[in-house]
Structure formats: structure tokens, C-alpha cells
Amino acid sequence: MLYQDALIVDYGPNFKGQALKTDKGIVCVIPRQLHPRTAASTAMRELVEGLGGNCGECRNCPVGSYG
């Protein structure tokens, strides 16, 4: 599986993040305001784990840095 940087975007305060599986790995889209120790970041980690990934392996992601 490929691990790269997260795509950080600003879709407004209601956007909680998304993780998608592609043929080359997992693509994570996270909000700019996501803090690593919140319910939203926990939900994001669960999305990634559900796709077979591990947030602890993405070094430049605010969620991954707290894996």
C-alpha cells in the first residue's frame, strides 16, 4: 500500500473528512481545522483502518502523526 501526504482542504465546518481506496492505495481528504485528538480525527482513523490502512504510517498528516 502507498502512503503519501493527506490532501488538506477547506470544505467548511461541517466537513469531517473522507478516506477512499484507489488502485494505488488510500487517499485521505481531511479538513484544515482537524485537530489530532478529537472525535472527528478518531472517526477519520476508523475510516482508514476500515480500508486496511494505518494512520500511524502517514508522517505528514495531523491525524497520522498521532496514529
Image: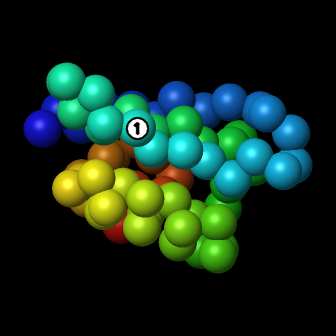
The quadrant of the picture occupied by the N terminus is top left
Whether residue 45 is situated above or below residue 27 in the rendered picture: below
Residue furthest to the right: 13
- In-image side of 63 versus 2 (left or right): right
Q: At 52% from the left edge and 72% from the top edge, which residue is drawn?
A: 42
Closer to the camera in the image, 35 or 51? 51
Residue 58 drawn at (x, y percent): 31, 47
Whether residue 4 is situated above or below residue 60 in the rendered picture: above
The quadrant of the picture occupied by the C terminus is bottom left
- In-image side of 9 versus 26 (left or right): right
Within 10 Å of the Cα at label 1, are there few (<14), some (14-19), or many (20+) other Cα atoms?
A: few
- Residue corresponding to mark 1: 20
Residue 18 drawn at (x, y percent): 54, 44
Whether residue 47 is situated above or below residue 61 in the rendered picture: below
Q: At 60% from the left edge and 33% from the top edge, which residue is drawn?
A: 8
Q: Secondary structure at mark 1?
A: strand
Q: Quadrant of residue 65?
A: bottom left
Residue 60 drawn at (x, y percent): 41, 41
Closer to the camera in the image, 47 or 55? 47
Q: Quadrant of residue 4?
A: top left
Amino acid under disc 1: Leu
